[in-house]
Every structure is written in structure tokens, then in C-alpha cells.
Amino acid sequence: MRTERLDTSRGGDGGSSPAQSHTALDETDHKIITELQEDGRRSYRDIARSLDLNESTIRARVRRMEDMGALRIVAFADPYVMGDSVMALVFLRVDAAHLDSVTEALLPLPEVSYVSSLLGPYSLCLQVQCADTATLWTLVRRRLEILEGVQASETWIEQEVHKLQFRAPLTPNGHGA
């Protein structure tokens, strides 16, 4: 399951800013990403053959994209297949003065697998996974809502995930990576 922090706004763990990442990737990088999205375990040799490039070129480019935070190859374990669990989306309304501190407080929580900032009535969206609804209730009511600056929350329990796919965004020419 993906549990690492992806911070594209400020260097740090997630790498460079979106503008830096975007301008630093060329067409070959996008083709390599596309190959890896089909199968993240695919060998550099197979990717090199597919793209008619040198294996060392693929290895160097993947390493560079990982170092700059543009690419991260991870395993994703489906929580519904793994066993009993409750997944939910939690939306938090946070006053502007506490947004950074609340966000930082959420990142280390093991139940939280995803955090994003929003424009709209809520400030943050979290995807959480808990063992059961009682654990979810405790997380929301006794750990999230008490954070200084949290004004309101709304929780939506996910009954079934119909599609979950991590894909690179469209390139400037309108094609997938």
C-alpha cells in the first residue's frame, strides 16, 4: 500500500515543484514512465528493447526521475482483498492559520494513506483505512477533529472501489505519459 509522502509543493520528500518536474521530463522520460505503469516490475532490458534504447540509458533516466521526485515505483496492496477493513474519505475544514500544522500532523498517522489540499468548502481530503467502523469513529472524533484549527469534518465510507489507477498526467501535446 502506498504510504509515502508525496509533496510536490515544496521539495522535501516528494521532490521538486510540479513546474520543475514537468519541464525536466522529455518525451523519452514519458515513454519510460508509460512502460513502467504497465508493469512496475518490468526489467530495464525489456523497456530498452521496447523503446529501442540502451539499457544503461533506461537505468540512468529512471534513477534521475526517482531522485527528482517525478517517479516512485511502489507496490499497492488492495485493502479489500487483504482482509477486513474500512476505507473512508475524510474531508476537513481547517482555518488558514493552522493548515500547515494540521497537514503535518496528519502525515505520520498510519491510518492515513492519502492527504491532499483542496479548493472548496473543505481544506483537506484524506483517505483512511481502519480495521472497523469503531476504529474509524475514534480516528475521526478523537484524533482528527481535536487538532487545533480543525473546524469541521465530513466522512464518507467507501463501500467498493471500482477503479484505482495511478497514471501520469497528460503531456503538453495532450497524450498520456
Image: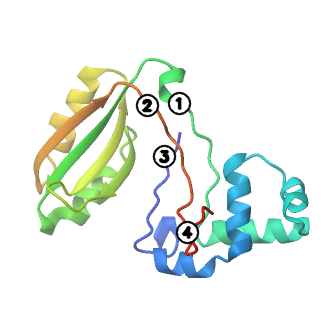
Identify the amino acid type marked 1: Asp
Assess disc 3: are there few (<14), some (14-19) or many (≥20) residues with their C-alpha within 10 Å of its C-alpha: some
Compared to residue 42, the image places residue 132 above or below, namely: above
Determine whether label 2 and label 1 are within 8 Å by CB: yes
- First along the sequence among labels 2 and 1: 1
- First along the sequence among labels 3 and 1: 3
Report the residue marked by disc 3: 3
| Residue 122 visible to an observer of this rendering | yes
Compared to residue 39, the image places residue 19 above or below, namely: below
Q: Nearer the viewer, mark 4 or mark 3?
A: 4
- In terms of secondary structure, where does tag 3 sit? loop
- Which residue: 40% across, 72% down? 9
- Which residue: 31% across, 46% down? 126
Report the residue marked by disc 1: 78
Q: Position of residue 156 (x, y in %)?
A: 24, 34
Identify the amino acid type marked 4: Gly
Q: Which sits in the foreground, 140 or 44?
A: 44
From the viewer's perspective, tell me whether residue 2 is left or right of residue 71.
left
Q: Position of residue 171 (x, y in %)?
A: 57, 70
Q: CA distance from mark 2 to mark 4?
A: 27 Å
Q: CA distance from mark 2 to mark 1?
A: 10 Å
Assess disc 1: are there few (<14), some (14-19) or many (≥20) residues with their C-alpha within 10 Å of its C-alpha: few
Q: CA distance from mark 4 to mark 1?
A: 30 Å
Q: Nearer the viewer, mark 3 or mark 2?
A: 2
Report the residue marked by disc 2: 161
Identify the amino acid type marked 3: Thr
Report the residue marked by disc 4: 174
- In terms of secondary structure, where does tag 2 sit? loop
